Image (tube, rainbow, N blue to C red):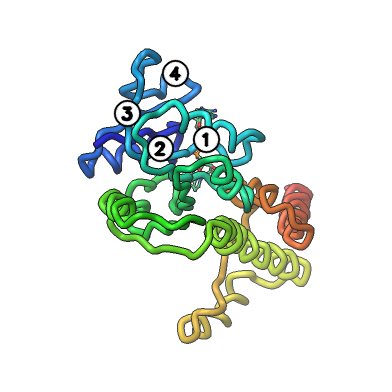
Amino acid sequence: MTDVVLGMGEVGSTLFDLLEQRKISCVGIDTDKSKCKNYSENNLMEAEFLHVCIPGEIENFDEIARDWTNKITGLKAIIIHSTVRPGTTKKVQEKLDLPVIFSPVRGVHRRFLQDVKRYSKFLSSDVKLADEIKSEIEKRFEKTQWMSSTKTAELAKILVDTTYYGWLINYAQITKIICDEEKVDFDEMWKFADEIHENLGNRPKMYPGIIGGHCVIPNLALINNDKLDMIKKINELFEKYTDSKV
Ligand SMILES: NC(=O)c1ccc[n+]([C@@H]2O[C@H](COP(=O)([O-])OP(=O)(O)OC[C@H]3O[C@@H](n4cnc5c(N)ncnc54)[C@H](O)[C@@H]3O)[C@@H](O)[C@H]2O)c1
C-alpha cells in the first residue's frame, strides 16, 4: 500500500509519519525539494490515496490538486486536509470522476502527531463512497466520523475551531481593556466566572493576548464574512492598546 502526501509542511510531514507508523508506505512531494521523501521526478507513481496538505489559500489550489491526481495511477480517492475556502472540495470534485474527500486537521504545532492521533478524523464527501474506500480510510485514521457534506466540514474547521477560538480571545481582550481602564485586577475579576464554568461549562476564561500565528486570523480571509471580520478588528484594537501601554 502506498499513499502520496502533497505539501510536506507541518501537516503533511505529520501525516506522512502517522501513515508510515500505520504501515502505509508514503511518497512526500513538495515544491521545496529538500522536503520531498521517497520521490524522484522519474518515478511514475502508483498510489491508493493522494493527501493534499498544501496551503488552502493558494489561488489555483483546485488545479494543483487535479494536476497531481492526473499524474498518479491507481488512485482510489483524494483527501484534502488543508483548511480551504468553503466550496473548494466541490470545485475539485466537479472535474474529477475520482471521489474527493475533505478532512480538516486539528492540532497544536508542538504536539501535532499526538493530537492527530487523539482526535477523531472528521471526513466528508459529496459523492457516495464504496465501502472498500471507507474501510481503507478507517485503517489509516482509526477513529473517524463522517459529515454529510464537504461544505459542512469546511465550515466546521473555520467556524467552530479557529474562528471560535479567536472570538473567545476577543472577549478576554475587551474585558482586559475595561479592567485596566477601571483599575481592576483582570484575574481577580474573572474568578467570579470559575464556578459557573465548572458547573455549566459555558464561561471559559481566556488569556488576553494578541492573536498571532497562522490560523485564526488568516482563516478569516478564507470565509470572507464581514460579521466575522470583527474578530480581526478587535484584535487590531487590542494590539494598538498594548503598544500604547509600552
Ligand atoms: N499547521 C497547523 O497547525 C495546521 C492545523 C490545521 C490545518 N492546517 C492547514 O493545513 C494546510 C497546510 O498547513 P501547514 O501548516 O502544513 O503549512 P506549511 O506552510 O507548513 O506547509 C505547506 C507546504 O506546502 C508546500 N507547497 C506549497 N505549494 C505547493 C505546491 N504547489 N506543490 C507542492 N507543495 C507545495 C510548501 O513548500 C510547504 O512545505 C493549510 O491549509 C493550513 O491552514 C494547518
Q: Position of residue 41 (x, y in %)?
A: 40, 15
Marks 2 and 1: in contact by CB < 8 Å? Answer: yes
In the rendered structure, find residue 50 and report the number of the disc placed on it: 2
Q: Are marks 4 and 2 in contact (CB under 8 Å)?
A: no
Q: Secondary structure at mark 3?
A: loop
For residue 33, the mark is: 4
Q: Is residue 50 shown left or right of residue 202?
A: left
Q: Nearer the viewer, mark 4 or mark 2?
A: 2
* Residue at screen point 29% across, 41% down: 19
Measured Cα–Cα span from mark 1 to mark 3:
16 Å
Q: Could you give the CA–CA distance between mark 1 and mark 4, rounded to whole angstroms?
A: 18 Å
Residue in the picture at 35% in, 60% down: 144
* Mark 1 residue element: helix
* Front tag of 1 and 3: 3
| 63 shown above or below 56 | above
Mark 2 lies on a secondary structure that is: strand
Q: CA distance from mark 4 to mark 2?
A: 18 Å
**Mark toward the start of the polypeptide (1 vs 2):** 2
Task: Quadrant for residue 6, please give it.
Answer: top left
Mark 4: amino acid: Lys
User: Which residue is situated farthest in the front direction here?
Assistant: 97
Residue at the top extreme of this rendering:
42
